[in-house]
Image (cartoon, rainbow, N blue to C red):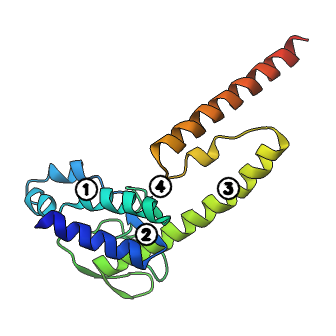
């Protein structure tokens, strides 16, 4: 029953969106909190992420996860002030800087979306620079650092190709110093 619901939710999200952004949660660490463990296991976050990732890949959509350490709940979406502490039991809070009242989850969702879109734009710009570098013959590994969904075989091919390019360039540099 739960797995069926996760398939329906993930399919709906992938069908209705070109870009899906999620937070890269430390689920294993969260399970160590005995007060939260049962609830976290019940909602199957890890399984939902797995399904979103592979369904996005199949459908040619972009799936991206922002860093676990991004303070999505503690950052004011209006003025970007970051609270020092925000315990889990606090569900709404008022920003001390701009005095905007925030629902913790809605604010976090807005911050995750904003951060994810910014990261993707940065990756796109890095890729443009990377392409220029590759055309110049210098090679780069920066495109392999992105967390966009790719099939394991395509990533492995890129890693092998990139490693060979870096090895060749190191050898060329080494040879030029020996001359």
Q: Secondary structure at mark 3?
A: helix
The numbered mark, 2 or 1, whose residue comes first in the sequence reads 2
> Gap in Å between the C-alphas at discs 3 and 4?
17 Å
- For the N terminus, the image quarter is bottom left
What residue does disc 2 label? 20
Q: Position of residue 82 (x, y in %)?
A: 42, 70
What residue does disc 3 label? 126
The numbered mark, 2 or 3, whose residue comes first in the sequence reads 2
Instruction: Find out whether the residues at labels 2 and 3 contact each other: C-beta distance under 8 Å.
Output: no
Among all residues in the image, which is located at the extreme bottom?
Answer: 100
What mark, if any, has residue 149 been given in the picture?
Answer: 4
Q: Nearer the observer, disc 3 or disc 4?
A: 4
Location of residue 121 (image quadrant): bottom right
Given residues 170 and 87, the one toward you in this image is: 170
Q: Nearer the observer, disc 2 or disc 3?
A: 2
> Gap in Å between the C-alphas at discs 2 and 4?
11 Å
Q: Position of residue 17 (x, y in %)?
A: 44, 76
Query: Which residue: 8% across, 59% down?
Result: 38
């Amino acid at each position: 029953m739960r797995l069926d619901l996760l398939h329906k939710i993930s399919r709906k999200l992938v069908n209705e969106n070109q870009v899906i952004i999620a937070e890269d949660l430390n689920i294993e660490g969260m399970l160590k909190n005995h007060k939260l463990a049962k609830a976290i296991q019940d909602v199957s976050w890890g399984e939902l992420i797995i399904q979103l990732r592979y369904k996005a890949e199949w459908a040619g959509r972009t799936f991206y996860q922002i860093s676990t350490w991004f303070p999505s709940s503690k950052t004011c979406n209006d003025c970007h002030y970051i609270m020092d502490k925000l315990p889990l039991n606090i569900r709404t809070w008022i920003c001390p800087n701009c005095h905007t009242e925030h629902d913790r989850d809605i604010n976090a969702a807005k911050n995750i979306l904003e951060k994810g879109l910014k990261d993707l734009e940065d990756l796109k710009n890095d890729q443009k620079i990377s392409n220029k570098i590759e055309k110049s013959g210098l090679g780069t590994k920066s495109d392999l650092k992105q967390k966009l969904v790719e099939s394991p075989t395509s990533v492995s091919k890129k890693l092998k190709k990139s490693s060979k390019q870096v090895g060749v360039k190191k050898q060329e540099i080494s040879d030029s110093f020996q001359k």
